[in-house]
Image (cartoon, rainbow, N blue to C red):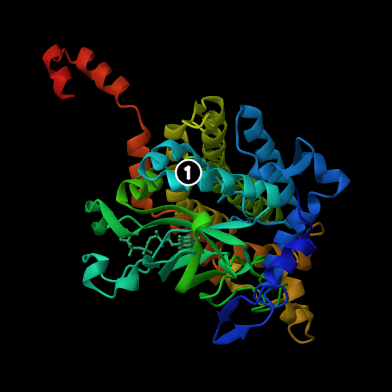
């Protein structure tokens, strides 16, 4: 079934405990730091009901209409449908919102792939996986990801410091397990639920551990406290910071203060083997929408740099065209990895269609690791005006307005207003506080760089290159046993 935006908002009014800048948030749907992103997510729900978007955003599952974003992929078309749906949504909202559900649901499909292994460890929980994967599309649930604990001193196992530094089970009851700890989570304050799983660390050398825990946590459950970072939306004039004010995907330290997780929401508990399986397969689907978002970021940088070159007449210069070509290579590199990962997709243990893992993970490394350089190239193309341009108010105020209009009018085609708007947009995309935050989001939100590289190493088939060099270099056949 598909929900409406209003049904989603209603679900958030569940008395959840949210804090921001020392203030208790009474209604997350109307608070200025959250309203813009709640509106964006509501819009995503409402679009699915509108005739012009419905066929791109929904599909029929028996009698039921479901979201394309939550459809478990079984054939290449399912991935192309998701591309189309994402395009509709991002074009509509005029920016890149990453954590709106489609990019986190894949973590649940990974769990489905491990169902048999998890059921061998503890058959009680296998049915919970099936039910929750279904529940997400049956109820159109906005689902986020809870991986990262505060961790404390990384050189020590959690048992040798404040034990709450990593989420753990403190008690079993007839109704379920009681958990304590905290996780850093984007979008938790305005989501329905999170898939919580461990950061695998030094404790995982044991066979059983109270830290090996995978479960669903309702974001409005008793004992869940969202302590959010300061927001960017509502800070400054939207004319000066157009992207930050459009929406901001607020992160929170989500504290679990003795939260009851009913048994039906537990996927695994105590077995470190299960925790390791989940960590090693977590992003096999969800890396796709994450990388796709960066193709849109690349398009925003290309568009900004090209409009600047057109306004200033610099697009006639060969050297400027070469820098634009660097941005194009970045964009097309991401696009090529995405399309190739669908074309060479692989069957998963649960019969789903995984994007080609080696290509997808290589694409994620390209997209994330090159972003800082590409942002700098785009900045360089825009020139210094993007960070020295006065705010919109100065363009209105007699005394400064005449001078700004004189010096920001480029020619008969480009007036001062369009020039100011482009520079404000470029600033918020490339150099503002918000731009820096978004860059950091890309580097960490799904996983840190070393983890991206580990996934790439583990999914690459080394046999081809090894065999090529063995034969080409005339290495002896008896090395094969050790290879
Ligand atoms: C904007 C933003 C949004 C986020 N959203 C979410 C979210 O929605 N859900 C979620 O669960 N988490 C989220 N995170 C947290 C993110 O997953 C973590 O920041 C990330 O996993 C790294 O953990 P850490 O910050 O504790 O870094 P640390 O573990 O302290 O590591 C710091 C650095 O040390 C180095 N390092 C550490 N360990 C190793 C190692 N084993 N090998 C090599 N180098 C290493 C790396 O350079 C690493 O970046 C978000 C983070 C940010 C910044």
* Of residues 325 and 250, the one drawn nearer to the viewer in this rendering: 250
Which quadrant: the C terminus?
A: top left
Image-quadrant location for residue 429? bottom right
Visible in this render: residue 432? Answer: no
Q: Secondary structure at mark 1?
A: helix
Position in image of residue 384 (x %, y %): 56, 66
Position in image of residue 78 (x %, y %): 65, 33
Q: Is residue 227 left or right of residue 136?
A: left
Seen at 42% across and 54% down, the residue is: 447
Image-quadrant location for residue 453? top left
Q: Image quadrant of ligand 1? A: bottom left
Q: Is residue 422 above or below residue 394?
A: above
Image-quadrant location for residue 67? top right
* Of residues 433 and 19, the one drawn nearer to the viewer in this rendering: 19
Q: Is residue 124 left or right of residue 76?
A: left
Q: Is residue 56 left or right of residue 115?
A: right
Callout 1: CB less than 8 Å from ligand 1: no
Q: Around disc 1, counting alpha carbons within 10 Å, would you say few (fewer than 14), some (14 to 19), or many (20 or more)?
A: many
* Of residues 371 and 105, the one drawn nearer to the viewer in this rendering: 105
Q: Count all numbered tags in the image, as a single digit.
A: 1
Seen at 76% across and 50% down, the residue is: 2
Residue that protrudes farthest toward the right in the picture: 51
Residue that protrudes farthest toward the front in the picture: 174
Q: Which residue is mark 1?
A: 126
Q: Is residue 141 left or right of residue 347?
A: right
Seen at 34% across and 72% down, the residue is: 164
Position in image of residue 482 (x %, y %): 14, 24
Q: Is residue 154 above or below residue 328?
A: below
Position in image of residue 37 (x %, y %): 67, 66
Visible in this render: residue 54? Answer: yes
């Amino acid at each position: 079934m598909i929900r409406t935006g209003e049904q989603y908002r209603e679900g958030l009014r569940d008395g959840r405990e949210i804090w921001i800048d020392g203030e208790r948030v009474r209604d997350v749907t109307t608070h200025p730091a959250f309203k813009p992103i709640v509106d964006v997510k509501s819009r995503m729900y409402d679009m699915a009901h509108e005739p012009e978007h419905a066929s791109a955003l929904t599909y029929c599952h028996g009698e039921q209409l479901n979201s394309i974003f939550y459809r478990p992929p079984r054939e290449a078309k399912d991935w192309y449908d998701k591309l189309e749906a994402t395009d509709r949504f991002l074009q509509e909202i005029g920016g890149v919102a990453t954590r709106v559900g489609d990019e986190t649901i894949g973590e649940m499909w990974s769990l489905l792939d491990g169902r048999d292994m998890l059921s061998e460890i503890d058959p009680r929980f296998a049915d919970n996986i099936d039910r929750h994967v279904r529940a997400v599309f049956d109820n159109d649930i906005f689902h986020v990801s809870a991986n990262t604990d505060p961790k404390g001193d990384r050189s020590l196992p959690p048992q040798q410091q404040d034990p709450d530094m990593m989420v753990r089970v403190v008690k079993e009851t007839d109704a379920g397990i009681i958990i304590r700890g905290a996780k850093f989570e984007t979008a938790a304050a305005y989501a329905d639920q999170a898939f919580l799983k461990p950061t695998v660390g030094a404790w995982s050398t044991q066979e059983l551990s109270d830290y090996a825990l995978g479960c669903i946590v309702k974001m409005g459950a008793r004992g869940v406290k969202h302590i959010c970072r300061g927001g960017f939306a509502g800070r400054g004039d939207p004319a000066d910071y157009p992207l930050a004010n459009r929406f901001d995907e607020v992160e929170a330290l989500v504290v679990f203060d003795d939260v009851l997780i009913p048994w039906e929401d537990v996927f695994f508990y105590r077995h470190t083997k299960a925790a390791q399986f989940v960590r090693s397969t977590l992003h096999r689907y969800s890396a796709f929408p994450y990388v796709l978002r960066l193709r849109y970021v690349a398009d925003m940088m290309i568009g900004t740099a090209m409009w600047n070159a057109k306004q200033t007449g610099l697009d006639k210069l060969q050297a400027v065209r070469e820098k634009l070509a660097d941005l194009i290579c970045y964009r097309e590199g991401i696009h090529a990895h995405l399309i190739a990962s669908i074309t060479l997709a692989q069957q998963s243990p649960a019969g789903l269609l995984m994007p080609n893992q080696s290509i997808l993970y290589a694409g994620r490394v390209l997209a994330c690791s090159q972003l800082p350089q590409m942002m700098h190239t785009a900045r360089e193309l825009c020139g210094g005006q993007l960070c020295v341009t006065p705010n919109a108010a100065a363009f209105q105020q007699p005394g400064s307005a005449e001078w700004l209009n004189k010096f920001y009018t480029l020619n008969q085609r480009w007036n001062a207003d369009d020039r100011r708007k482009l520079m404000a947009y470029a600033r918020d995309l490339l150099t503002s506080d918000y731009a820096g935050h978004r860059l950091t989001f890309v580097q960490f939100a799904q996983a840190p760089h070393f983890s991206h590289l580990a996934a790439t190493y583990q999914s690459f088939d080394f046999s081809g290159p090894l065999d090529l060099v063995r034969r080409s270099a005339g290495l002896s056949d008896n090395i094969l046993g050790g290879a």
